[in-house]
Image (spheres, grey):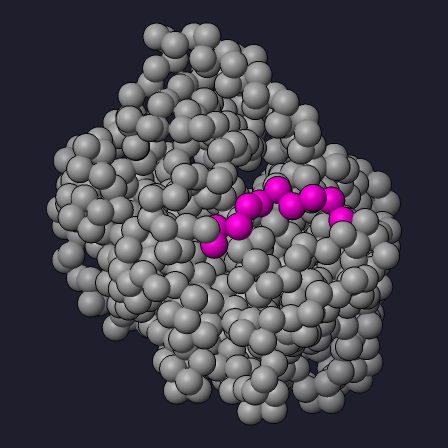
Amino acid sequence: MTESTATRRTAAPNVLVVLVDDMGFGASSAFGGPIDMPTAERLAAGGVRFNRFHTTALCSPTRASLLTGRNPHAVGFGTVTNFVSSDPGYNCVRPDSAATVATILKDNGYNTAAFGKWHQTPGAETGPTGPFDRWPTGEGFERFYGFLGGSTDQYHPALYDGVTPIDCPSTPEEGYHLSEDLADRMIDWMACQHATAPDKPFFAYLALGATHSPLQVPKQWRDKYSGKFAHGWNRQRDITLDRQKELGVVPEDGEMTAWLDLVPEWDTLSEEDRRAAELLMELYAGFAEHTDAQVGRVVDALERLELLDDTLIFYILGDNGASAEGGVQGTANEGILFNGLRDSSARIVARANELGSPTTAPQYPFGWALAMDTPYQWVKQVASHYGGTRNPLIVHWPDGVAARGGIRPQWHFVSDIAPTILEAAGIPAPASVGGVEQQPLDGVSMLYSFDDADAADRRTTQYFEVFGNRGIYHEGWVACTAHRVPMQAASTDVPFEDDVWELYDTTVDWTEARNLAGTHPDKLARMQELFDREARRNQVLLDNTRMQRMREGVPARDPARVVTYPGTMPPLLPDAAVKVLNRSHTITVQVTLDVAGSSGALVAQGARADGGWSLHLDEGRLAYCHNVADLHSWHVRSDAVVATGTHAIRLESIYDGGGMGKGAVLRLFVDGGPVGHGRIESSTAFYIGGTGLLTIGRSHGVPVTADYTRDNRISGTVHSVRFELGVEGSPAGDADLARVALATQ
């Protein structure tokens, strides 16, 4: 509880923060881009657009900074929650000394709710035992409906209501889509809140999973853009910059930045490569417009409730720049790239009718990410350059902002949102929350600029760092260095002392097009010194081993080498589940079958869209499938039908060793007797997609195998599932598993 609670102003506004995922500066029509976003245009026409607003270049850090008003590393969020380490700036544990704006508003008379993506809870704490103090309902939100991870399947999301995992309210066949569901829930909540407490303001946070991969949306949305991108990504940049200048979001003298050499120019691509890239960009555009349409439904609901004029809306188009995580070629299944494999344009084109459906998990190519960040350099993850960090912001508040349709050029950072909300609500930042002294806000309120386009900047300095990519802004100057390319192997990281720094004077070079490092070495040196000071003050630690440690699963997630789950265990997110990849292991299922011959999962993880595994029954026969990113599916099956009654069913997987993603020898047993054996030649190296849920007695989403459907359930009861885990990366001769296997031959 906030000590010395301020008296809330009678006119305190409702607050709605809408955060779109993975959208660059040059994507939306409201900022000159090729994607129709009429809601963004509507809010911009009735409010103001900030064209020098910045994020952190990565999702979890942006969200932590948004909600706390502090710098990301200062509250432990120098990385995403999937990749935590023990380093204070990267442990993803928000300190109690940095209460969220939701907590402060709730303590001062607001109702609070969050819908959609969270990505603020350390992975190991996302299981059914929590702890729950870093879930949304522990961080100031009285209501939460959404998902905890960085992304989720739009048709089969890993949904939570509060802290309880729940099934989707309907199926894709019935028209289900996550973005629509989130809008429905938010609209219902606002209507109920207004009906029962009309004099009480609310704070609503809509953090959409879109437009993060997987790019999934009904085909009619994609088809609207058919043929609209045949001119390619290089030409699109020119078209977008011309529109940006017409709108005034980029000044007339703004220059196009140089094309990135590591990405091929459009005219050098084969016809097949261009066709695949077009399809994926059409899909992204349809996905983005569909997202904006759901925001429009929320805005329409506010208008029906007669709340729109007195609701302070922040519409943030991207938590970072456009994503290049689809690689140079793009992909129909993002798990392919995340596991170090390659998709092909031929495969993408062959699956054209499926793209965007529940059986695919697409992402567009690097070239389109550069085009969606027009006119800036680089993309998501590259915190050094504005292509990674500059995002559109629209502010709409008719009762509080007299301006209509204006541009605001003041330089601001995502940590400035929280203090702006507090000032608008008339609530001072508390000195203490819950008996804990609060660290000062790093953000500054933007309220001064709402009705004064010519006001001098109040944010003059900001550091940036993600994966070693780093930069510093100070009074119009930017010094920066791009340390690592998105999706490159960690082993290719160069020593930090070998990084080449760049220098830009953005008071005369809006787009960072002219590098002055060679002509202003003294200025560059002073800027580097300033970065070092800010980095030390904010717990930034440069470490080239962090990415490799993250990929290898450090810190370890397994509570023990032997883990037994009850048959009633709710679905587990991958960071909270046992880790069976890249190691020998056994899985023993205690099950009672009421009827012989049924099909369905005994225990499974992942989904078809980009891979996973399943131990299951196929018309009563014991079977195992390992699906590697939907590229390779390996099966081992028994011949005999498992009889009715209670059985101990066991899988033994003896891993080849020698690295990640290697093969394994598999053996199947029923009540100790061997019933099948075989071999998989490869396995999933790192990433299990389809939200990666571990489920017992069922599958989540479209199953990894066609042996059974999503609706299939075995006729019986799974009582327990026991995992015995070998050493990670261990070869076939390792540990007790090999001895067990030899004894049963």
> Which residue is at a point 83% across and 52% down the rendered structure image?
436
Q: Is residue 359 above or below residue 618?
A: above
Q: Which residue occupies the foreground of this view, 691 or 80?
A: 80
Q: Which residue occupies the foreground of this view, 695 or 425?
A: 425
Q: Main secondary structure of the magenta part?
A: loop
Q: Is residue 299 above or below residue 651?
A: below
> Which residue is at a point 68% across and 86% down the rendered structure image?
715
Tell me where residue 533 appears, x and y as whole percent.
Answer: 63, 22
Tell me where residue 585 appears, x and y as whole percent.
Answer: 76, 51
- Quadrant for the N terminus, please: bottom right
Q: Is residue 202 among what the camera can see? A: no
Q: Which residue occupies the foreground of this view, 359 or 301?
A: 301
Tell me where residue 486 appears, x and y as whole percent.
Answer: 46, 35
Name the side, left or right, on which 93 lies relative to 22.
right
The magenta span reads: 438-447
Q: How many marks?
A: 0
Q: Is residue 48 above or below residue 399?
A: above
Q: Quadrant of residue 166?
A: bottom right
